[in-house]
Amino acid sequence: MATRKSTIYDLAKLADVSASTVSAILNGTWKERRIAAKTVEKVQQLAAEQQYTLNRQASGLRTSKSGLIGMLIPLHDNRFFSSMAQTFETLARARGLYPIVVSTLRDPALEVETVSALISYRIESLLVVGATDPDAVSRLCASHDVAHVNVDLPGTLASSVISDNYWGAQQLTACLVGHSQPQRAARRNKLYFLGGVASDYATRRRIDGFTDTLAAQFGPTDPAQVVACGYEAHLAEAAVKALYQRLGGLPRALFVNSTIALEGVTRFLKTLPDAELARSTFGCFDWDPFAAYLSFPLWMVRQDIEGLLGGAFEILDAGSYAEGRVVEIKPALLSM
């Protein structure tokens, strides 16, 4: 049986003050009413202990729907997530909803803090995109009966709609093998994976797709063929430069894990002669139309944003968000 949520009257009784005093403290208007700082501290501490979430809308509106739907994304400065946000807004408005998009900077504490704030504004549902700790968000949403679906990265406590990272990596790896040129030097006659954090779900699935595809054709891969250097562009730039120096040149082919990592890789590649770039083959798991203007051919995996969000809205519409199932959407392989 669900635990009854604390009300403003519960807090007033515990603090031995009036409900209007509690309301002023939680709404931040206590200074105007000249409420003692000691009383403010006591009420705020009780509110934290009781896990009380302030509803910033008038209490008389509790019986009506807010029409608000939220989306959590890790970052705005990434084409995948910015496109996700834009498509989400379009789909939400088509359903007569009012979308709110907030970035949480890949910070698990900020994810929970932000969701708590959104709940206080009475959001009806939430799409949790690429969360660092989706289950922590799920626990908070469940405690306030907020419908929610994970997108891009799965959780275990709510249904998830994600890209088929393993299949997409298989397709890209097979493409790189088929279009690359064997190198004379044995140490350079290999494919390398670069970018991401190996323990993260999406990167792990892509690494598995990469290594399994290579193993099926060439036998077991060398662990050194996976360079999980992180997501930032400057880390990818340093990693590909170090790889180039270690191998004495570019590898047969390079699988780049994201467009952010590709930015760093490209910074280094532009220092090399075009003739040297032509002897290697490049692929990226993600898509950006500007890649068509690079000086070297590039294969890219484009994730189906409309399919991901469409699947998430279907789960919300069906009310099956608590089932914990995972739906995988296949991406597309493109030549730039």
Image (cartoon, rainbow, N blue to C red):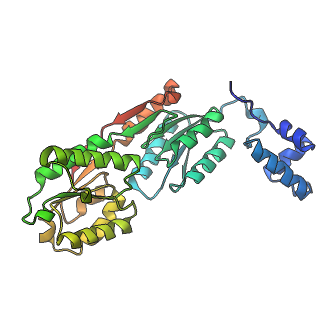
Q: Is residue 142 above or below residue 244?
A: above
| Image quarter hosting the C terminus | bottom left
Q: Is residue 213 above or below residue 181?
A: above
Q: Is residue 191 above or below residue 175?
A: below
| Image quarter hosting the N terminus | top right
Count of number-bearing discs: 0
Q: Is residue 140 left or right of residue 236?
A: right
User: Looking at this view, is 222 or 63 the one in front?
Assistant: 222
Q: Is residue 63 visible?
A: yes
Q: Is residue 68 visible?
A: no
Q: Is residue 196 left or right of residue 217?
A: right
User: Looking at this view, is 2 or 28 the one in front?
Assistant: 2
Residue 47: which quarter of the image? Answer: top right
* Residue 242: x %, y % from top left: 27, 71
User: Looking at this view, is 83 or 238 the one in front?
Assistant: 238
Image point (12%, 60%), residue name: 189
* Residue 101: x %, y % from top left: 54, 48
User: Looking at this view, is 311 or 276 the one in front?
Assistant: 276
* Residue 115: x %, y % from top left: 61, 45
Q: Is residue 217 left or right of residue 82?
A: left
* Residue 244: x %, y % from top left: 22, 70
Image point (27%, 67%), residue name: 240
